[in-house]
Image (cartoon, rainbow, N blue to C red):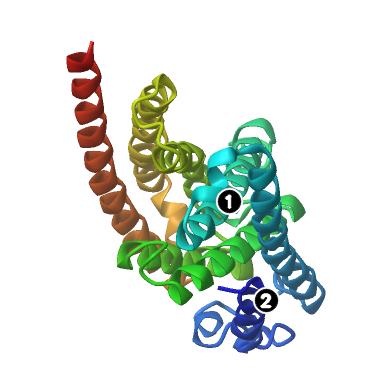
Amino acid sequence: MGLATVWSGCFLILLQGNWMGFSVSFGLLAGSVPSNEFATPRKEIQWLVFVFSGVFVCVVVYRLTAIFSSLFLKGYGKLSKAQKMEWNNRGFSTFHAIFASLASFYLLILSNIFNKDSHEELVINRSSTLSNSVLAISTGYFLADLMMILWNFPALGGLEYVLHHLLSLFSIIQSLLSGQGQIYILMILFTESTTPFVNLRWHLDVAGLKRSKLYIWNGIALFFGWLVARIFLFMFFFIHIWTHFDEVKKIFPMGFYSLLVVPPMLAMMNIFWFWKIAKGLFKTLSKAKHSK
């Protein structure tokens, strides 16, 4: 798939809604978001710039991954065209994962935006220029990646990846436009911290290093990272919703029901993938043990 197609496809998707008119932004989706003073025309323009910045960075990292891989990795030239495309795609996937997880960690833990006693405002209504920018950039990433997945379907992932990206876009855009529930969106974005391990596992496999110690240690790191970031964190996520349910109920209707439906769906997908990761790790460790 040509990267120009990714760019133009994302551009058409974004322009289906009128960013300058909040009530019709993003078509039917924004119609479910309450018309308030949070998403002003000026803010919408800023967010649109960051969305396109997210897409643009994906394009640049895709190209740079191809250039540096061809220069420094001998095995890259032996890959098929489809493998090179996925290799480069996972390059910008890893880049976004590192960015999103670090930004989420900072906003949730290091900054005082969501500290219990730092603001009088309800925690579900808290946001900042930085958090809005992070959500907009991640929207750009998910749009670019989704376009590549659909254009090359199912080479870059099956229906579960399409569902994952659609749910992510749906949730992020609602939170961005309404300014509500960003604490929960950032928690979910932090789960992207496991993506670099997933991508490295694929890279090592394609490079013929499946029996290497790095592959084994990466598998172990992926197992425990997934357990913490996508299993335990989701437990905390649901506990936080339960203990703050009086505030959660004040989220606009579509956002409220989305918060009750989308995270459980993502949690079930994470449990399914965790089972596959655990099964793969057990198989790898068994082979390594018998090869000694």
Q: CA distance from mark 2 to mark 1?
A: 42 Å
Label 2 crowd (10 A; few <14 / some 14-19 / many >=20): few
Label for residue 4?
2
**Image location of residue 231, percent across then percent down:** 33, 38
Secondary element type, mark 1: loop
Residue on which the image places disc 1: 122
Q: Nearer the viewer, residue 283 or 98?
A: 283
Pick the quarter of the image with the C terminus.
top left
Residue at (34, 60) in percent of width and height: 260
**Image location of residue 97, percent across then percent down:** 56, 46
Q: Nearer the viewer, residue 126 or 264?
A: 264
Farthest top residue? 292
Q: In the rendered view, does 210 fall on the left or right side of 138? A: left
Note whether 170 is above or below 69 in the view shown: below
**Image location of residue 282, percent across then percent down:** 21, 27
Secondary element type, mark 2: helix
Label 1 crowd (10 A; few <14 / some 14-19 / many >=20): some
**Image location of residue 220, percent across then percent down:** 35, 24
Q: Nearer the viewer, residue 24 or 205?
A: 205
* Amino acid residing under circle 1: Leu
Q: In the rendered view, does 176 fall on the left or right side of 50? A: left
* Amino acid residing under circle 2: Ala
